[in-house]
Image: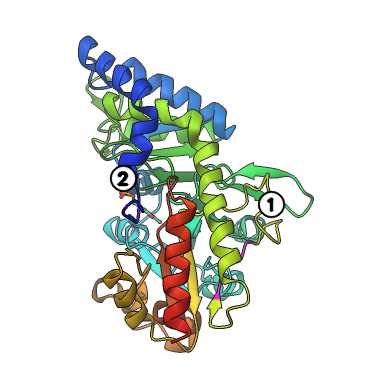
Amino acid sequence: MRKIQMVDLKGQYSQIKDVVNPSIQEVIDTASFINGSKVHEFQKNLEQYLAVKHVIPCANGTDALQIAMMSLGLKPGDEVITADFTFAATVEVIALLNLTPVLVDVNPDDFNINIEAIKKAITPKTKAIVPVHLFGQCANMEAIMEIANKHNLFVIEDNAQAIGAAYTYNNGKKAKAGTIGHVSSTSFFPSKNLGCYGDGGAIFTNDDDLAHTIRGIVNHGMYRRYHHDVVGVNSRLDSIQAAVLDAKLPHLDAYNKARQDAAKKYNKAFSGIDAITTPKVLNGCTDICDTCDCHVFHQYTLKVAGVDRDALVKHLNENDIPCGVYYPIPLHKQKAYQDSRYNEADFTVTNELVKNVISLPMHTELDDEQIEYITSTLINFING
Ligand SMILES: *Cc1c(COP(=O)(O)O)cnc(C)c1O
């Protein structure tokens, strides 16, 4: 059996080497390392893929979030509501901009931000909501946009984990993750569903004015050379990373399909095991169907019940099965983000999830033998 990895980037690279290598070489040959034509080509291709008016590439997903937030003209002390159960980058940029993060609980089934909790957290100071499409599945965007419209709030989608996923509205209409809110961010970190070979990120919006503002912010606040109209940053996707991404973009749907296939096999092996809850696909689907884009499985995350999760992690690792706990501590309990206004009773779901979740190896190169070994090792542990 091939060695099991949490993410198998080498295996994926070997399949696309013949396209990626000459594309990188071309950047080197032309020495157009910054803002080269590859960046522009990738930007156009991604706009077309997502059916979004503007993609603005930048240096990483954290910058993308920060820049998206900078573009909205928020003021220090404005409150921004986001999920308690996510990667710290989401809350970090809110705090860095001197905005006030307001963390709220998530749903126990899809791990995404809870609609009732958002409603409860709204105050006159609330200015924005940041839903995170966690593990590859969209948050309930229809309800979030409704709340936002009612209270005149911005919606910034953190789409670092769900590129290529679609959101299905109640009337059956679909839209790609990251194209629904006022502005969205994504990450091209190597292990993300569309990853480059270093750092990269992008901001998406359908709003022409916001797009213009953002294009200035990423470039030192310049809209005319050496005229700095706003405080900006330096955040660029470099041409070599754009070349890698442009070579991989045509494969993104197939990559996501490979993840779904692995998820289906996991689901099948775990069906009927009472101690395991497999990931719920909501958002228009009841299961992972053959044409499904409701969930792109950035992570395949189980909940275990009546099982010592940490002992299970140790057992899998001892059997050469890497796994992850995303996330082991709720953000509201992190030293940097504690707030005396929080009440533990409002975080019952995240407080429980951090004890029960476990993410299994998930990538485009998992084979049947590996999945069989992972699932049987896990089931044997649970059955004692
Ligand atoms: C990865 C990730 C980010 C940050 O992306 P980087 O490119 O690593 O800066 C932000 N939010 C979420 C939810 C992520 O998973």
Residue shown at 24%/22% (left/top)? 34
| Residue annotated with mark 1 | 289
The magenta stretch is 277-281
- Among all residues in the image, which is located at the extreme front? 1
Residue flagged by tag 1: what amino acid is it?
A: Cys
Check the image and report above or below for 157 versus 215. below
Residue 107 position in % (x across, y down): 56, 72
Q: In which quarter of the image is residue 318?
A: bottom left
| Residue annotated with mark 2 | 63
Determine if residue 347 is in view.
yes
Q: Main secondary structure of the magenta part?
A: loop
- Compare residues 247 and 112 and report the one nearer the observer: 247
The local secondary structure at tag 2 comes to: helix
Please name the colour scheme applied to the rendered image.
rainbow
Horizontally, residue 343 falls left or right of residue 221, namely: right
Circle 2 Cα neighbour tier, 10 Å, few/some/many (<14 / 14–19 / ≥20): many
Quadrant location of the C terminus in the rendered image? bottom left
Q: Establish whether ligand 1 lies closer than 8 Å to the Cβ of label 2.
A: yes
Horizontally, residue 316 falls left or right of residue 115, namely: left
Horizontally, residue 299 falls left or right of residue 173, namely: left
- Decide which of tag 1 and tag 2 comes sooner along the chain: 2
Residue flagged by tag 2: what amino acid is it?
A: Asp
Quadrant location of the N terminus in the rendered image? bottom left
Check the image and report above or below for 116 versus 211. below
